[in-house]
Image (cartoon, rainbow, N blue to C red):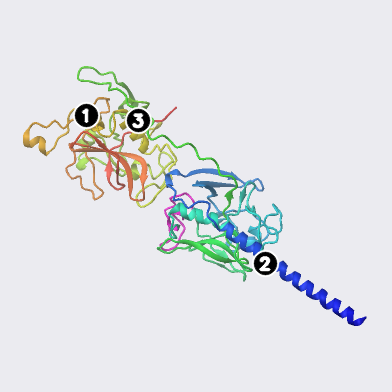
Amino acid sequence: MKYWLGIVLIFCACTDYVGQIDDDIDVLKAFNKAREESSLPVSEKIVDPSSIFEGVLEDSRDGKSYRTVTIGALTWMAENLNYEIGGSYCYNDDPEYCDKYGRLYTWATAMDSAGEFSTNGVGCGNGKLCAPTYPVKGVCPDGWHLPSYGEWSTLRFAACGCEDAGQSLKSKRGWNSEGKGSDQFAFSVVPAGAKTTNGKYFYEGSQAFFWSSTDDGLEIAGGYSFDYGISMSSYRADMRKMYAYSVRCVKDVTDEKPAPEPESSDSYEEPCKTDTTDDCRYGSLEDSRDGHIYRTVMVGSQTWMAENLNFETDGSYCYDGVDSNCIAYGRLYTWATAMDSAGVFSQNALDCGYDWTCRPEYPVRGICPENWHLPTQKELRALVTAVGGEEVAGKMLKSTSGWRGEKEYEDGMMNLNGIDAYGFAAISSGDMEYSGDFRESMGRTATFWSSTEDGGSDAYYMSLSNIGVGVNLGSNHKLSASSVRCVKDSL
């Protein structure tokens, strides 16, 4: 009897052991499957920074508001989460750092291992392998979730398709050494540092770490790290689950992107001015800042200043430093001055200038009078379209006198002036190179800034020349100085 009982006990023990092995295999299979699936990027498409759009998220749990940004297929929080809960910390245990950087969370807290807000990440924590149900809400607000490693990869691809995505995703300020970014995508990674298991804090000012919902092992979970080095790199990091790092949440259902603005909002319009008639729709504008009065003209659906702006401010110049040239031709402005980078008249283009890429709020008033704004590249293109296109717009927009050139003097036959068919009267005001050289450009060229930048060093403009009858809608160095024509705000 004892013999058979022993056999039964041995059999039961073996059965339990075998069952445990089967359970462990199932857990490992589920873990590997979840890890593999959550690592797949949503998209591997590079995104044009001009296509992003921003919004606001309010966390109903504590009323805090966060800036958001849609980059390609995903909408992200553009600030670090700052929801207070057990397992979250302020850097150096100082509440001022929470206000500055948001809170730092252990992985179990970020995943909501306790199931306070959802069951998707229950039991996920240190010393365990887990296979959460994606998307994992975790500690995120309603309608948002902790990003998977694949979603972080999608962001990296959107920024540049390379490991060095950090430069365009990091904030412009707050980083030590060479760590500053251009924040080209308005994602604004700040160097919030980390908390280790011994209660010490490290890397504030030099690194940023973000959790993903992808499990990478018993004590490791996937995430993304940004460092301060000249490489401006961002890369996948295996992060210890017991440490505390920052959290950025992703929207569950991406907002539909607004329909793209048409390339041009105007079609061709018949000229309103000839040698004998002038039926153009003129008006006038008084600049309340200095009392200067400008003629205006309507071309297509846009109302433009028909004279160059002559408002005196730092960063503006008279051609060749001669005051009478300002009276005759208006002033020349660097791009930062044209955009009102200092925020004297509006906050729409604060800090927009050379060696930065920025995200102005359109329309950009810039240096323009109240209720007028610096034209976008598309508004310049709409003007060019309305007067017949790039190949003939120079002739149509240029003034009927004042344009000259070498050939004119050589043969006495060249007429380099325009016909001013729309009352725009683009005069040959010249420009100033970023070196400070005026290069004898008066009489030979006229350039007009837009509020649309082309990277850190250049911005788009419209250029008219004494050579040919077309226009150039290209870009120029931001430290150069060009004329400004303002457009009336839409009602």
| Marker count (numbered) | 3
Up-down relation of residue 190 to residue 13 (above or below): above
Earlier-in-chain disc, 2 versus 3: 2
396 in relation to 361, above or below:
above
The question of residue 177 being in magenta is answered with yes
Q: Secondary structure at mark 3?
A: loop
Q: Can residue 290 be seen by looking at this rendering?
A: yes
In this view, the residue in front, 394 or 34, is 34
Residue at image position (24%, 50%) is 435
Q: Which mark is residue 287?
A: 3
Magenta stretch, residue numbers = 166-188
Q: Is residue 153 left or right of residue 413?
A: right
97 w.r.t. 410: above or below: below
Residue 14 in which image quadrant = bottom right
| Residue 374 image offset from top left, x and y in percent | 36, 36
Nearest to the observer: residue 43 or residue 336: 43
What amino acid is found at the position of numbered circle 2 in the picture?
Lys
Q: Residue at x 9, y 31 (%)?
A: 413
Quadrant for the C terminus in the image: top left
Nearer the observer: mark 2 or 3; the answer is: 2
Residue 453 in percent (x, y) is at 36, 45
Q: Is residue 171 visible?
A: no
Residue 353: x and y, percent?
A: 36, 48
Distance from disc 3 to disc 1, alpha carbons, whole Å, reads 23 Å
Amino acid type indicated by mark 1: Ser
Residue contact at pointers 2 and 1, CB within 8 angstroms: no
Q: Residues within 10 Å of mark 1 (few under 14, many from 20)?
A: many
Residue located beneath label 2 in the image? 128
Q: Quadrant of the N terminus?
A: bottom right
